[in-house]
Structure formats: C-alpha cells, structure tokens
Amino acid sequence: MKVSILGVSRSGKTCYISAASQVMKNCNLGNNCSVSLKANDVVRQLELDNNFMSMVTDNAWPQGTDKTTAYNFRLSFQTPNVTLSLPSLWLDDYRGGMLNGMGRQDCDDRGRFIQSLSDTAVIIFLIDGSTILNAMEELDKDVSHRGQTNAAERLAAINEISIMENILHARKQKGENIPPMLVLITKSDVFVSSEELNKGKALVKRLLSSLFACGSKMFVGITAVSLGSGLDKGDNNSIIGQLDISTQNNVHLPLLFAFYAYLDAMYDKFSNKDNVDKVMTALRGVFNGKISFYDNGGEAFSV
C-alpha cells in the first residue's frame, strides 16, 4: 500500500509525520482498540525519533524536506476480537514547495507525482491553517481581516490551495482515476473558534471542487490536526507556544483514514470479510465526529 503525502509550502509535513510516528507507536484508541505503527527501516525510524526529540526536548522545529523521502511502515490495528495488520505501508513524503514551484526540479517532481497516482492507494494533502485564513480574508467578506497579510499574500494562498484542484481536474479530464484523498488542515490551532474552522473547511471544499462536487466519483475525507496551541516559529527555528502531540489533537487520524480507505477499496479481495467489517466499524468509531467523509460529492458519513 502506497500513500502520497504532500502539501503547500510551510504546511508542516515533516513535523506531522514525525509526530504521528511517535503517537502511533503503541497507541490506545479507546473502546478497547489500539494501533501500532513502526518503521521497517531502522535508519528512517531514528530520523523520525530525532525529529520528535528535537521538538519535545530541544524546543526546536525539525528542518523541512528538500527532497522526496519514502518511509516504509508496518501497521497493526486491534479490536477486542480482531487484529488486522498491514506489513508494508509506504509513505512518500514529497518535498515542500513542489506543488507550486516553477523551477525545473519542481516541474520534474510534479510530473513524477502525477505519474505515481496510478499505483497510489491514498493521497493526504496538507494545507496549513494560516494559508486557509489568508484565503478566507480575500474571498469571504464576512471574515474580519486580522491585518497580518497584504493582498498579494492572500492571493498567493488561494493559488497554493487551488494548484491541487488543477492537477486533479486535468487528470479527470483524461478519464484517469484519482485515489481516495484526505484533505488535512494542519496548524488548526490558528483558528479562534470551531465556527471559524468550519468556515475554513467550507472554503477548502469550494476551492477543491473536483473533489467535492456532485458526481466527482471521489472518496474524500476532510479533517484538522494540530501539534498544540499558540504555535509559531521563533529565532533559530525555536518553538513558540505549547506543544500537545497526542490523539486529542487528531495526530493519529490521517494514517488511520488511509488504512480505512485501503480496506474499503480492497474489500472484495479479503477472504474473511467479517473481520474486515469489524475493523472498519471500529475505525468509524475512532473517527467519531472528527473526519467528514464524502463519496461522489455527497456526504457519506460523519460519525
């Protein structure tokens, strides 16, 4: 199973992957369910461990990626009666800025990503909350301006979100399938209220209409995560604010969404469908009100 994770510039991919790899190592999900996620490559696991320790011990953000990095995990999900394991979950982490850059390397990397979609099981697309707020200030007149950005920055934010829409629309025009996708709003602590976050989600759905429009033939989820509260970057990459890297902030949900989408897509190939049904039901309980699902443009379920 291969998952492609990519995002707009400064979306926090490196921080998110490092945090998720720690939270999900041996994670109690409640309702007698648990998940275990570990890297199959010792060196990659050490890299993720060091990134995490940089945050919690050194109070410093890890450096972002300047190249595409592949991680290979093994995932095991347990309920009281069933254990389902995925021995190889490949996570392709595309470097930040690849989506909207204009350099030769950017164009080459975009081309490789588009070609890879034919064997990608799930896409996780990260958009940071500040980018969404900038777009909201430009497009939603009922959102009060915070006076922190200019018109050029707000327009750039719209373009950063919309580039994925352009890529997916072009693929659909060619009649090519698009794998299930999770839109992941990172740094969600920048929103001052759940109402503002919901407005942000509505704007994202508008800008990514190829995913959410009626008849889209897409299976899509949308959710939000954070690594704490009041977070920002200070001098020398230092962390400002309060870290809280835990399931309370939904850090575990994106990779569990990928697992769920994989089970859904491969359902007919499983010999013991009863066990798969039990795990999928348990996963919907884990998602409880935190991920909204859309199938072919309509809301599939929001548990």
Image (spheres, helix red, strand yellow):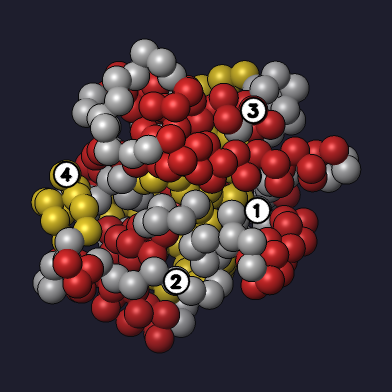
Disc 4 marks a residue whose amino acid type is Ser
For numbered disc 1, what is the local secondary structure? loop
Q: Which residue is mark 2?
A: 65
Residue 226 in sight in this render: yes
Which comes before the other along the chain, label 1 or label 2?
Answer: 2
| Residue 293 seen in the current view | no
Q: Which residue is mark 4?
A: 229
How many C-alpha atoms fall within 10 Å of the one at disc 4: few (<14), some, or many (≥20)? some
Q: CA distance from mark 3 to mark 4?
A: 30 Å
Q: Helix, strand or loop at disc 4?
A: strand
Circle 2: element type: loop
Q: Amino acid at mark 2?
A: Thr
Farthest residue to the right: give it.
174
Q: Identify the amino acid type marked 3.
A: Ser
Disc 3 element: helix
In the image, is 180 to the left or to the right of 134? right
Report the front residue among 217 and 193. Answer: 193
- Residue 98, by quadrant, is bottom right
Query: In the image, which disc is placed on residue 209?
Result: 3
Vertical position of residue 126 compared to residue 57: above or below: above
Q: Disc number at residue 121?
A: 1
Q: CA distance from mark 1 to mark 4?
A: 32 Å
Q: Tell me: 63 left or right of 54.
A: right
Image quadrant where one finds the C terminus: top left
Q: Quadrant of residue 140?
A: top left
Instruction: Mark 1 vs mark 2: give the one in front.
Output: 2
Who comes first in sequence, dot 4 or dot 2?
2
Q: Residue at x 30, y 25 (%)?
A: 145
**Label 3 neighbour load within 10 Å: few <14, some 14-19, many 20+:** some
Query: How busy is the neighbourhood of tag 2: few (under 14 within 10 Å), some, or many (20 plus)?
Result: some
